[in-house]
């Protein structure tokens, strides 16, 4: 930053700058120039006063398969083709000039490709002055009446500013006037260069508000050019010396022009306030817009000549016009500038017309020009890099080194970005199709730059004198001269009278007429008188000198004490100013803290609300938890009850099954006894037949054996429906039946090894049987009954077991024979839905015809029916024994 340079004296350390945490982003504006007549296609459209839209030109679209889309870019403000120079100035430059007048620094630069209107924007043309002449004009319009006399402010060679007293300033003015070196203010606009005549119309003149009248001002301008990373002073007075070097500092040999003296490059230095400045750069004090612009124009001409002479590409140089404004408060009388270097404020506005931002390939540069172009490009590249690093540092809180020193341009403006000041950039764009791709790059840079922030400049401290001094002094002077005029003019007439008195105090001269040639008395008398007079005069002179010296020393003493007092007062004022500053700082700190407190209160409020919400949530969740726990407890007790019930049911079922099994065994026993009885009956009948065949010996009808019956008898209707167990005319079997009693039969239980073990309740229960897997005569000889357990797959896919039963007979030849008498089919089936229902509890009696009870009764009935059917039908179809598959866990 080039902050106000207070020519600080070494005896006092520079007061610490107040910490300035207010930052503003770099203000980026966009100006779209009109298309020139030979360009047809336009690729930029202003769609809003802050936004432009770029669309790829037709040719490019075709080349890249339409990969280019329309892109929009936003800026602080966009100025369309109809924007006048004045409008642009009002928005962009005026606030910067205003700042400069109030002691703050500003930087304004134009950026864009060659031909996009950077120079037009900055400098303008006849009748359409750019930002530079307008800025100068505004400064002079504002400070015009308060300007100090020339050479009162005097730049030192270390970027500081001295103050000279009136006499020294006057002497220097006379000296310079005699040398004819100082540019004279042109008396009228007619004398100006026609190239820049009438840049600003009188009605467009503007002025800053709130200019401090009790200060004295002076404007200094410098104009430099940066080409090929060398800095040249465009206002330097070059002595015409044909013998001087014919090489420019960039190393380019000159053409054969001995008249032209190439400019010497300058170096950058840092002053004691760490501000960058061009060492030894000419700073011309100017007193009016015209004079300032005249100086600019001379520099401009010099630049043109140098570019032509050195065969440079002018679009590749950066130009910097620096307007420096020095201001210092008037003394307590409001008459002269306060002779205190510490009170001088220097602010400056840099107006930069950057080189064209296009890549080197676009301009057909060759050889050394290409190398130079590379350097110029390099400086813009460095500018871009600096902005990127700055932005990254600011956004991510990193502390990367910003490479300001990589190019002269960035190094020179380092203080603006590192320190404080207002920075604005005008991005100039030409909407023609040829520039499209370069314009895209310009837009990207501009967008990025907008995100860089610069510390806001602080207000300069106010001086301790009473305001309105200048006006009071002017009023006093007016009054004095009026009064003197009233008295009849100044007091000059009194001086001859005093002289006369003095002359009269000398001894009178003797008569000096010589009439006689031999008169030798007159002359000696006269000589003596004159000598006396001479002695008197000499002693008077001595006396006068003594008195004068005395007076002088007295005056000097008084002056010294006065100076001391003044110094003391200034010191006090300085301290007062510092205290004021301190108070201001503290006020701003208080403001900041208050803001912070408000912010925190607001946050607390939000947190309180959030807490309330959470508490509410917590309550509802607890509620829910409780109700769920209740439900769980209920469900658990329900479960326990169910378990108890299930256990009861299991016990019931078990009992039932046991009863059922017992009942079946009994039924079977009964059946077997029946069979036995039938056989006996048949045997008896056979015997009777044999006996009857002998007529003389009729057999007595044997007593009919008592048919075995079960204790619990069936319903008589059912029994009568079954066929009679005593068939008449049944075939007589020629086998000898082994004797046995019912219930004590011995069985051969033939189960082939291929049989599947079925987990069913309905298994043949044959106590005391001989179990075989293949039929053997030995086993048959010991038994009188035979059963084969045969398994097959039924049509419904279920395994069906058949018990094929028969009786064992002894053949006459002594072997064993089996006569099959019965086939019993056991089949497993999936229980039906209704059959799954169980009695809910022992205690609960079944409602109506209980399903389960009905189920069991049905099986019982069917079993008995089947037994009786078999008895009637020899080897009949048998009966189906439906067993329930053991219930699996669901
Ligand atoms: P740059 O400095 O960017 O290379 P210039 O300022 O020299 O471009 O502009 C190139 C030409 O375009 C000049 O003839 C200038 O008068 C013209 N021009 C640029 N901007 C405008 C504008 N806004 N209105 C009218 N003419 C313009
Ligand atoms: Mg230009």
Image (cartoon, rainbow, N blue to C red):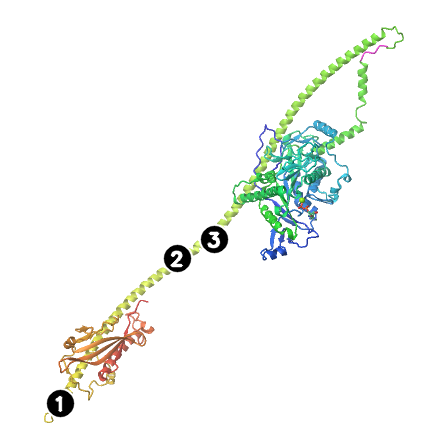
Magenta highlight on residue 507 = yes
Q: Which residues are magenta?
A: 506-511
- Closer to the N terminus: mark 2 or mark 1? 2
- Secondary structure, mark 1, is helix
Measure the C-alpha gap from mark 2 to mark 3. 20 Å
Q: Residue 562 occupies which quadrant of the picture?
A: top right
Q: Which residue is mark 1?
A: 690
Q: Mark 2: few, some, or many residues within 10 Å (few <14, many ≥20)? A: few
Task: Please tell me how crowded label 3 is: few (under 14), some (14-19), or many (20+) other residues with Cα within 10 Å.
Answer: few
- Numbered mark located on residue 162 in the image: none
Against 752, is 486 above or below? above
Secondary structure beneath label 3:
helix
Point out the image quarter for the N terminus: top right
- Image point (52%, 42%), residue name: 398
* Circle number at residue 613: 3
- How far is mark 3 from mark 1, CA to CA? 112 Å
For residue 541, say whether it is visible.
yes
Answer whether residue 410 is magenta in the image.
Answer: no
- Looking at the image, which is closer to me, 873 or 408? 408
- The residue where tag 2 is placed is 626
Quick check: is the Cβ at mark 2 less than 8 Å away from ligand 1? no
- The location of residue 613, given as percent across then percent down, is 47, 53
Name the element at disc 2: helix
């Amino acid at each position: 930053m080039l902050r106000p340079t207070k020519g600080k004296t070494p005896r006092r350390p520079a007061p610490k700058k107040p910490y300035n945490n207010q930052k503003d982003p770099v203000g980026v504006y966009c100006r779209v120039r009109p298309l020139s007549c030979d360009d047809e296609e336009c690729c930029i459209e202003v769609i809003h006063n802050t936004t432009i839209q770029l669309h790829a030109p037709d040719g490019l679209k075709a080349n890249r398969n339409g990969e280019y889309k329309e892109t929009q870019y936003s800026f602080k403000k966009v100025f369309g083709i109809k924007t006048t120079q004045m409008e642009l100035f009002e928005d962009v430059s005026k606030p910067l000039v205003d700042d400069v007048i109030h002691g703050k620094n500003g930087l304004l630069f134009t950026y864009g490709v060659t031909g996009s209107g950077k120079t037009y924007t900055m400098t303008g043309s006849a009748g359409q002055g750019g930002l530079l002449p307008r800025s100068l004009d505004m400064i002079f319009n504002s400070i015009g009446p308060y300007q100090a006399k020339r050479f009162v402010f005097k730049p030192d060679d270390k970027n500081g500013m001295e103050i000279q007293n009136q006499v020294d300033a006057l002497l220097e003015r006379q000296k310079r006037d005699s040398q004819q070196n100082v540019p004279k203010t042109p008396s009228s606009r007619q004398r100006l260069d026609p190239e820049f005549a009438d840049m600003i119309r009188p009605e467009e003149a503007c002025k800053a508000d709130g200019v401090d009248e009790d200060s004295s001002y002076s404007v200094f301008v410098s104009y430099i050019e940066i080409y090929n990373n060398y800095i040249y002073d465009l206002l330097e007075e070059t002595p015409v010396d044909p013998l001087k070097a014919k090489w420019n500092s960039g190393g380019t040999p000159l053409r054969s022009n001995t008249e032209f003296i190439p400019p010497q490059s300058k170096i950058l230095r840092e002053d004691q306030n760490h501000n960058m400045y061009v060492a030894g750069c000419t700073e011309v004090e100017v007193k009016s817009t015209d004079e300032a612009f005249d100086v600019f124009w001379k520099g401009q001409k010099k630049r043109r000549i140098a570019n032509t002479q050195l065969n440079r590409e002018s679009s590749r140089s950066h130009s910097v016009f620096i307007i420096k404004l020095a201001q210092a408060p008037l003394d307590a009388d409001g008459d002269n500038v306060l002779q205190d270097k510490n009170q001088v404020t220097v602010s400056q506005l840099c107006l930069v017309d950057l080189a064209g931002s296009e890549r080197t390939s676009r301009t057909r540069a060759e050889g050394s020009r290409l190398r130079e172009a590379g350097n110029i490009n390099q400086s813009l590249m460095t500018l871009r890099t600096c902005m990127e690093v700055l932005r990254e540092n600011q956004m991510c809180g990193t502390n990367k080194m910003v490479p300001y020193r990589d190019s002269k341009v960035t190094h020179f403006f380092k203080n603006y970005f590192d320190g404080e000041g207002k920075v604005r950039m005008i991005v100039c764009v030409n909407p023609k199709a040829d520039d499209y791709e370069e314009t895209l790059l310009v837009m990207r840079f501009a967008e990025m730059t907008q995100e860089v922030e610069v510390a806001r400049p602080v207000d300069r401290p106010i001086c301790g004198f009473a305001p309105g001094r200048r006006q009071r002094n002017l009023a006093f002077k007016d009054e004095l001269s009026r009064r003197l005029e009233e008295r009849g003019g100044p007091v000059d007439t009194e001086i001859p009278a005093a002289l006369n008195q003095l002359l009269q105090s000398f001894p009178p001269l003797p008569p000096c007429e010589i009439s006689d040639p031999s008169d030798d008395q007159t002359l000696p008398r006269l000589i003596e008188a004159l000598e006396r007079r001479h002695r008197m005069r000499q002693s008077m002179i001595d006396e006068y000198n003594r008195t004068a010296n005395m007076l002088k020393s007295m005056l000097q003493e008084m002056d010294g004490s006065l100076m001391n007092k003044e110094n003391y007062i200034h010191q006090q004022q300085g301290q007062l100013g510092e205290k004021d500053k301190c108070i201001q700082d503290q006020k701003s700190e208080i403001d900041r803290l208050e803001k912070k407190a408000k912010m925190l209160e607001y946050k607390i409020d939000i947190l309180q609300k959030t807490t309330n919400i959470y508490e509410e949530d917590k309550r509802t969740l607890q509620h829910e938890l409780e109700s769920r726990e209740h439900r769980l407890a209920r469900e658990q007790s329900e479960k326990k009850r169910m378990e108890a019930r299930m256990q009861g049911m299991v016990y019931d079922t078990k009992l039932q099954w046991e009863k059922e099994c017992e009942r079946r065994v009994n039924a079977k026993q009964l059946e077997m006894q029946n069979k036995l009885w039938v056989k006996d009956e048949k045997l008896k009948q056979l015997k009777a037949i044999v006996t009857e065949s002998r007529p003389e010996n009729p057999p007595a009808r044997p007593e009919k054996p008592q048919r075995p019956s079960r204790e619990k008898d069936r319903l008589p209707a059912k029994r009568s429906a079954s066929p009679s167990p005593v068939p008449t005319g049944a075939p007589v079997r020629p086998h000898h039946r082994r004797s046995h009693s019912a219930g004590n039969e011995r069985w051969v239980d033939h189960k082939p090894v291929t049989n599947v073990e079925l987990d069913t309740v309905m298994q043949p229960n044959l106590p005391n049987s001989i179990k075989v897997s293949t039929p053997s005569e030995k086993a048959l000889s010991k038994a009188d009954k035979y059963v084969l357990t045969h398994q097959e797959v039924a049509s419904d896919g279920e395994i069906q077991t058949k018990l094929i039963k028969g009786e064992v007979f002894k053949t006459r030849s002594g072997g064993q024979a089996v006569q099959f008498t019965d086939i019993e089919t056991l089949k497993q089936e999936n229980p039906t839905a209704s059959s799954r229902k169980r009695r809910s509890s022992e205690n609960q009696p079944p409602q109506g015809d209980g399903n389960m009870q009905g189920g069991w009764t049905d099986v019982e009935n069917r079993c008995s029916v089947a037994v009786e059917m078999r008895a009637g039908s020899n080897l009949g179809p048998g009966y189906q024994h439906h067993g329930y598959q053991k219930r699996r866990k669901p």
